[in-house]
Image (spheres, rainbow, N blue to C red):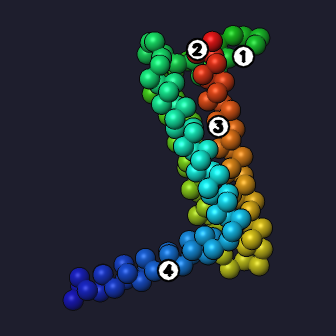
Amino acid sequence: MVYSNFYACFHTARQKVGVVFRSVGNLRVARWYLAAASALQLLAWVQALYIYRNLAGALLVRHYNVDLGIDLVGDAGQIFYYPLFALVVLILNFVVAALNREHRNFRIFVQLLLAAALVFTLLINVTLFFVYLINFR
């Protein structure tokens, strides 16, 4: 009896979560934002993997200042924090947008949050490009 009650609650919760996320997925603009953000996410992970594999040593220069020179050095594995952080921002923005599905400005929220995640992912790609230039040029 307890098992069937747990399964029924799990199934109901799964259906409700599906309805919430489908509300965002039904918007055409949201699908475009998610597709563009996914492509940029893939590019960010490829960039991070390329930088990680081609490093000569165990250290990674993460920041360079024109006035002071190199001011942030870390382990080579820390390069994966950049695309991971962008992925977390994308997922959190998507969840926040989905949870506001009953608000009267739902479409504006979706566009605002997913556009912010897209811009953030784009900036992460630019950051990874500059980290590449610092370490290999």
The disc placed on residue 65 is 1
Q: Earlier in the sequence, mark 4 or mark 2?
A: 4
Describe the element under mark 4 as helix, strand or loop. Answer: helix
Describe the element under mark 3 as helix, strand or loop. Answer: helix
Q: Is residue 52 above or below residue 39?
A: above
| CB contact under 8 Å: marks 3 and 4 | no
In 3D space, how far apart are the residues under numbered discs 4 and 1 (Cα atoms)? 49 Å
Q: Earlier in the sequence, mark 4 or mark 1?
A: 4
Label 3 or label 4, whichever lies nearer to me, is: 3
Q: Position of residue 26 (x, y in %)?
A: 63, 74
Q: Is residue 56 above or below residue 9?
A: above
Q: Is residue 43 above or below residue 98?
A: above
Residue under pointer 2: 136
Q: Position of residue 131 (x, y in %)?
A: 62, 23
Q: Quadrant of residue 32?
A: bottom right
Q: Earlier in the sequence, mark 3 or mark 4?
A: 4
Label 4 or label 2, whichever lies nearer to me, is: 2
The disc placed on residue 73 is none
In 3D space, how far apart are the residues under numbered discs 1 and 2 (Cα atoms)? 16 Å
Amino acid type, callout 4: Lys
Residue drawn at (54%, 43%), measured in percent from left and top?
42
Image quarter in which the C terminus is found: top right
In 3D space, how far apart are the residues under numbered discs 3 and 2 (Cα atoms)? 18 Å
Label 1 or label 2, whichever lies nearer to me, is: 2
Amino acid type, callout 3: Ile
Amino acid type, callout 2: Phe
Comparing 53 with 7, the one in front is 53
Residue under pointer 3: 124
Residue drawn at (63%, 16%), measured in percent from left and top?
134
In 3D space, how far apart are the residues under numbered discs 1 and 3 (Cα atoms)? 18 Å
Residue under pointer 4: 16
| CB contact under 8 Å: marks 4 and 2 | no
